[in-house]
Amino acid sequence: MNFAIVQCLTRVAARRDAQIWRMGLHAAVLALLALAVACSSSSGSAGTTGTYVKPGFGSGDATTADVHDAASPNDSAQNANDTAAIADNGVGPADMGPDPDAVADAADTADTADTGGPTPICGDNNCDDGIETCADCPQDCGACTPVCGDKTCDKLQGETCKTCAKDCGVCPPSCGDGTCDPSESCSSCVKDCGACAAQCGDSVCDAAGGETCSNCPFDCKKCATVCGDAKCDAAGGETCSTCPGDCGGPCKICNPLTSENCPAGQQCYVTGAGPKCSAPGSTNASQPCNGDADCLKGNLCIAGVCNPICDTTAASALVVKCNLPGACLELQQTDGTPIGWNLGICVGNDTCNLVTNNGCASGLACYPAGTGGKACATAGKLTAGQPCQYPEDCAAALACVGDGTGAGSLCKLKCNTLKGTMDCGGKTCGSVTIGDPPKTAADNLGVCK
């Protein structure tokens, strides 16, 4: 590059430096190259300067302006050699020298072509196409449209683990998301995994799964007793009497003396509704009881004590025989009529004391029974002087004896005839006879007169 070109560039650059430095690096280089080309093509000889023509717009007339370089005092002389300026539009003689303004304008034109205008500024509300983008200037160009797979989970733009697992990761298990995850089960999430299959024994009666009281009573409880289902539900109260269709009616009435027609292990008892079979208890003979069901099989609870069953005719070989001095006492209804079936109980074989009641369990008293025998029974509640019918009607310290007139029996204070008046507070202790024919009572039993 010769001195004239350098001098041209220096002059133009001095006037255009502000615009050049506002450009980007690439645009600035292009602008300088354009200036160099313009200066090179327009330079006639070293150091030549003169009148520079600034293009007019539309009139075709030329406007002249002298440019004086402060660093070159010879410019004035040089300018004198210049002739009238001729317009750049091709009318008139050729231009004598380059006009720095024209060169700068050409550079501006090149700049504009290269950069598309002034340097873009992020935040000016103008998204410069090709320069500013949504990535480096969302203020002007707006937020970028989310792209699944760009490794950025853009939650503000709606990306989630459901819409873009590539960027946001796999969603954690959630009941109701339509997927039965390994951590979910039919019991914890029916929506995703479906209902569990019915399982008998889980304490849940799953009707939807087919569980019923019939095939799974553990979960659904015992079915209600239904007469006519061809099942004799004894636990539910079905019998040959209440449901002959299920239990094989008409009923075969059981025998209270022998317990015939009862299932194995059961005993036939007399009830207000007739003889019925049921399971016996475990209390031994001569022990206190509250009901027939308390006593061992073959015993009945009479007067609060378990007593062996016996046949009053002694004809049945299926029941025990009462040993002497015991006797088979026939059981009667409350009206005094026999219960039937020759049913009786053995009494009089207990070893107790008729005066002191020793040998009987607590709450029991010793009474005359059988043919001179003794039996423990629940003590009665009648007091001295009250009428009585049976020995066990009177309290433990009393005996039921006749008044000597034949009018009836009364409860009287017991005493020991060997002790005389000691047990009677100074009164006479009279002896007692029992049985038919009458016999003196055992244990020196007497009553105070």
Image: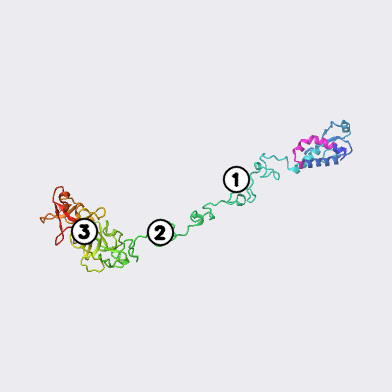
Pointer 1 or 3: first along the chain = 1
Q: Is residue 213 above or below residue 165?
A: below
Q: Helix, strand, or loop for circle 3?
A: strand
**Numbered circles on residues, count:** 3
Residue at numbered disc 3: 374
- Horizontal and vertical percent for residue 64? 82, 34
| Magenta segment includes 8 | yes
Q: Mark number for residue 218?
A: 2
Q: Is residue 403 above or below residue 310?
A: above
Amino acid tagged 1: Leu
Q: Distance between the residues labelled 3 and 2?
A: 53 Å
Q: Nearer the viewer, mark 1 or mark 3?
A: 3
Q: Is residue 436 above or below residue 149?
A: below
Q: Mark number for residue 156?
A: 1
The magenta stretch is 7-27
Q: How far apart are marks 1 and 3 (CA)?
A: 104 Å
Q: Helix, strand, or loop for circle 1?
A: helix
